Image (spheres, helix red, strand yellow):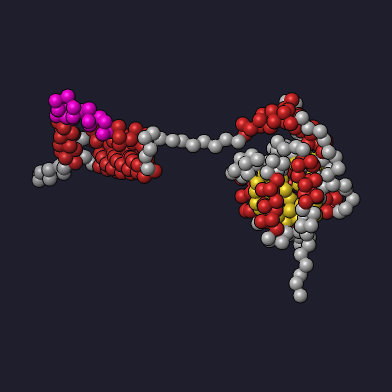
Amino acid sequence: MTATRMKPRVAVIGGFLGAGKTTLILKAARVLAERGVRVAAVLNDQGDDLVDTELLRRHGIAADQVGGGCFCCRFPDLIDALDRVSADGPEVIFAEAVGSCTDLVATTLRPLLRDHGERFRIAPLTVLVHDTPNEPDLRFLFDHQVAEADVVIDRGVDVAAWIDGLLGEGVAVGTRSIAVDYARYADAEAALGWLNARVTVRRRPAVSPAMVVGPLIEELGAATSAAGIRIVFGGMLLTAAQTSRAPNLLRACGAIILIAGLATPWFGAERAREVLAAAGAADGAGMRIACTVAVALGSSFVWALSPRGAPRPR
Ligand SMILES: Nc1nc2c(ncn2[C@@H]2O[C@H](COP(=O)(O)OP(=O)(O)O)[C@@H](O)[C@H]2O)c(=O)[nH]1
Ligand SMILES: [Mg+2]
């Protein structure tokens, strides 16, 4: 005997970007899970990278997506996505339309009812509203979305009651068609287009990732080890100062070296190399002075740290 699979109910949800559609689907999925009802979702965006799809998947919901355009202009992609999520045997599939989309009744609900009724049961079109926009383009979209909705809700809706309405047979589906001025609609959609942006950084001439990352890591390593050596050496001088022949000299040098070590991550080993290179240029005079200072300082440290002579017997 083969189990007869129920036709999944497809519930399209419209409403502005940020109205709370994805959050509502998550809440509804929790309510339906408590009733033992399997839920899937199809998300929609003008771009190709849908964070919402990933979010729903992380909550254990079978989710797929239609990218690169709204349901209305990518209807075949919507059908493909509905077919893919149907493989898991959901009883309810939420289809979240992109926030700038309207005319969903004519372009999505009616074709679903007319051509795909043997596979899907179509629920009333819900539009979720939150803030009412004032800007003319946004207001145009908002008003059209609300005008064609079978059910209009806000964030404060009783989710369980809303679901009962969707799954019952009491609400007519896709009857509120609207006349849309498509030139005006295109302008309004374009006004929301700035929200989809992806940034690619190109380097000319082209370099491999290793050529970019490698020197950064080397520089980091050099800075870290240079800092470590300075901090340790500075600390040793400060510790030894007390019992040395020249406590004040060692304290001063130790403090300077310690501070230089702590500052190394900001001023870096590269800066030290530049200073040495500059000193080494100019016919080597700078390098000779630097070496003389280093030898003088080194000799002072050796003298200051060497044991004092044994006390003379009285
Ligand atoms: N406080 C509160 N925040 C909500 C509610 N619904 C959505 N949000 C928040 O509004 C933002 C947009 O929600 P989202 O579901 O992604 O909106 P969508 O673009 O319509 O899918 C998110 O930061 C949500 O956390 C709600 O009922 N109450
Ligand atoms: Mg969303």
Residue 83 percent coordinates (x, y): 69, 56
Residue 78 percent coordinates (x, y): 69, 48
The magenta stretch is 272-290
**Which of the pair 62/104 is nearer the observer?**
104
Residue 185 percent coordinates (x, y): 73, 31
Q: Is residue 6 visible?
A: yes
Q: Residue at x 15, y 34 (%)?
A: 295
Taking 159 as reference, is 297 above or below it? Answer: above
Asked whether 55 falls inside the magenta stretch, the response is no
Image quadrant holding the N terminus, namely bottom right
**Which of the pair 157/99 is nearer the observer?**
99
Image quadrant holding the C terminus, namely top left
**Which of the pair 176/288 is nearer the observer?**
176
Q: Is residue 44 left or right of residue 181?
A: left
The quadrant where residue 90 appears = bottom right
Dominant secondary structure, magenta: helix
**Which of the pair 300/167 is nearer the observer?**
167
The quadrant where residue 210 appears = top left
Taking 243 as reference, is 142 above or below it? Answer: above
Asked whether 282 falls inside the magenta stretch, the response is yes
Residue 234 percent coordinates (x, y): 28, 39
Q: Residue at x 17, y 37 (%)?
A: 298
Q: Is residue 264 left or right of residue 2?
A: left
Q: Residue at x 30, y 36 (%)?
A: 269
- Residue at the limit of the structure toward the front, as seen here: 115
Q: Residue at x 62, y 53 (%)?
A: 58
- Residue at the limit of the structure toward the left, as seen here: 313
Q: Is residue 32 visible?
A: no
The quadrant where residue 120 appears = bottom right
